[in-house]
Amino acid sequence: MAKWFFRIFVIIIASFGFSYVPIEFNTDFLSGFYTVIGIMFPLALTLITSFSFFEVTNNVLVKRQREQLKDIRNIFIVLFSIATLFFLFKSVSFNFSWKWIRFNMTSFYAMYFLFCIGYFIRNFALLAILKEELDDAIRVYKIRVNNLEN
């Protein structure tokens, strides 16, 4: 949970920082980000559901991996749901300026969308590694069993 508070804090700080930059994140830019997230989300769910534990005999491993996949799936769903809400409210522009402090809501949306894209990419890579490790472990186990039978 502390990791998520830290991540939210970083997104907010980055939003403050980008409020000073003369780059304007217009609604077309945000729509492009959301489109990328919208493409990545079903791919992530497909990758998660492609895991098969049919040939794994270690019940403790299966339970642990299924819990991890369930947690990753739930996080993907929550991140995409929040991104969808932000996308629906993207036309709501809130600008705050007091002395030297500035905040632009559009920058916040953009930073959140960038975070989601980065998070999805990172987890795609980790899921691919996990799938390869699982496949390798099954393959090694089958080779060992076949050698014992012969």
Image (cartoon, rainbow, N blue to C red):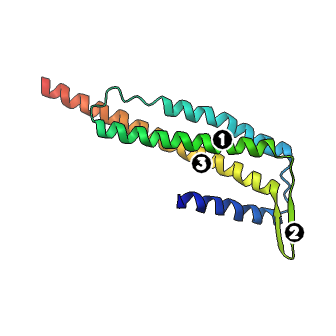
- Residue 40 is drawn in which quadrant? top right
Q: Residue at x 36, y 36 (%)?
A: 134
Checking the image for residue 97, the label placed there is 2
Alpha-carbon span between mark 1 and mark 2: 29 Å
Q: Is residue 102 above or below residue 37?
A: below
Q: Which residue is mark 3?
A: 119
Observer-nearest of 83 and 127: 83
Q: Are marks 1 and 2 in contact (CB under 8 Å)?
A: no
Q: Which residue is mark 1?
A: 80
Which mark sits nearer the N-terminus, 3 or 1? 1
Q: How many marks?
A: 3
Label 3's element? helix
Residue 12 placement (x, y as % from top left) = 71, 62
Q: Amino acid at mark 2?
A: Ser
Which mark sits nearer the N-terminus, 2 or 3? 2
Q: Residue at x 56, y 33 (%)?
A: 45
Alpha-carbon span between mark 3 and mark 1: 11 Å
Residue 111 placement (x, y as % from top left) = 72, 54
Alpha-carbon span between mark 2 and mark 3: 30 Å
Observer-nearest of 87 and 114: 87
